[in-house]
Amino acid sequence: MSVRLPTARLRASLRRAVRWRAAVAALGLLAAGTAHGQAGNGLQLVGANVQRHANAVLSLMAYSVVPDLTSSSLSINNASTDDPGIVMSQLGGGFTISKSFPLYLEGAIAYSRYDPTFIASNGTESRSIPTRWNTFSGTIGIGWDFPITANKELVFRPIFNASLGNVSSDLSIGKFALEQVTDRNIDFLDGGSLNAYGLGGAVMLDWEHYRETYEVDVELRYTNIHLQSFGGTASSVTGTATAQTANLWARWRAPTGLRALDRPVRYVLELSHSQYLGSQAGILGFNHLTTLGTGLELDTSAHEVFVTRIRAVVRYVFGNNVSGVSLGLAASF
């Protein structure tokens, strides 16, 4: 079983001076609108856009519920403060039980944090309301390998996926400000939560070509998972999104000529490209990401340890308006 585990968040920066504002606008997270209410009638949220935020956060969750190397570790900084306004991390893996019983199982857990700021106004005064939305999600998948070639190196793999997630809101302002906000949407911002489930599936072509002098893995995958909110603490906030991604992933491994732990040390070359087609397309300013990676792999199979291989890979990630570098660790069992 292969498990891809990023250990350093990808620090991505949008290229233009207005890059953070552009990304937030693309998310629909800052709505242009006029103040509601009159002076003396209490503060209300400008634009009343909490519902739009809920849909946007589920769209962010769409990145997390799809097993995907290119977006498994992503951080976008607020240009004005250099603090991460959006952080996403994912740990996932998949394996086929055996050639004779080709049941495929996969799973992924993910965490993301998004820090929006709302504006409350009564027509004469305005106050910013910073919040922190934490999202946890998990995805499982079950599939079956249908060999296409006689040697079973190339297989077609349909997969059924199910996801479950939760978005919780932490209002980071004092009680004195809360008491002056009369908008009903504040119910969600003040310690509210939003649950979501997802159902869908994927189809994959998987080619594993292993030889003594080199090893090649190639996966071509299309995933479609529909996310729907349920059971939130604020009835005024619901959300839907569709996680739809097409991904190509390839890895080349070959001996370096060095030895460690009584086995050859291999070098690793990786390529991954993801095209985002669902609700997540464009909300962060890009609709595709490409990853190029290189690293080393230690074979531990000669010793009685739990893992058989350990890899360290440095990856460069780029797309339209975004780029960055990350360091990843992975293990095979």
Image (cartoon, rainbow, N blue to C red):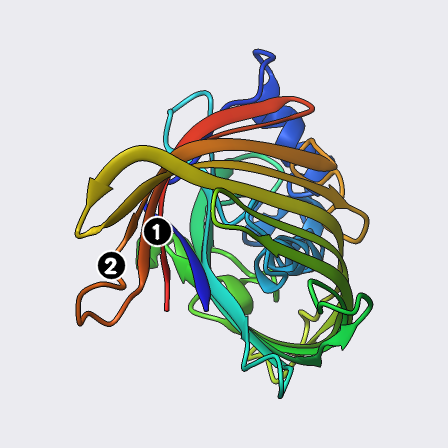
- The residue singled out by tag 1 in the image is 173
**Three-letter amino acid code at disc 1?**
Ile
* Of callouts 2 and 1, the N-terminal one: 1
Q: Position of residue 87 (x, y in %)?
A: 45, 45
Q: Is residue 87 visible?
A: yes
Position of 173 compared to 183: left or right? left
Q: Nearer the viewer, residue 96 or 152?
A: 152
User: Which one is in front, 224 or 234?
Assistant: 224
Image: 269 above or below 250: above
- Residue, far bottom: 101
Residue 132 marker:
none
Q: Residue at x 61, y 12 (%)?
A: 16
* Residue at left offset 71%, top offset 48%: 247
Q: Position of residue 48 (x, y in %)?
A: 69, 52
**Which residue is at the far top?**
17
Mark 1 closeness class: few <14, some 14–19, many ≥20 residues within 10 Å: few
Mark seen at residue 300: 2
Q: Is residue 214 left or right of residue 272?
A: left
Q: Position of residue 116 (x, y in %)?
A: 51, 45
Helix, strand or loop under label 1: loop
How crowded pointer 2 is (Cα within 10 Å; few <14, some 14-19, many 20+) is rated as: many
Q: Are marks 2 and 1 in contact (CB under 8 Å)?
A: no
Residue type beneath disc 2: Thr
Kindly identify the residue that appears in the image at 17 percent across and 72 percent down: 304
Q: Look at the image and tell me whether residue 137 can be seen.
A: no
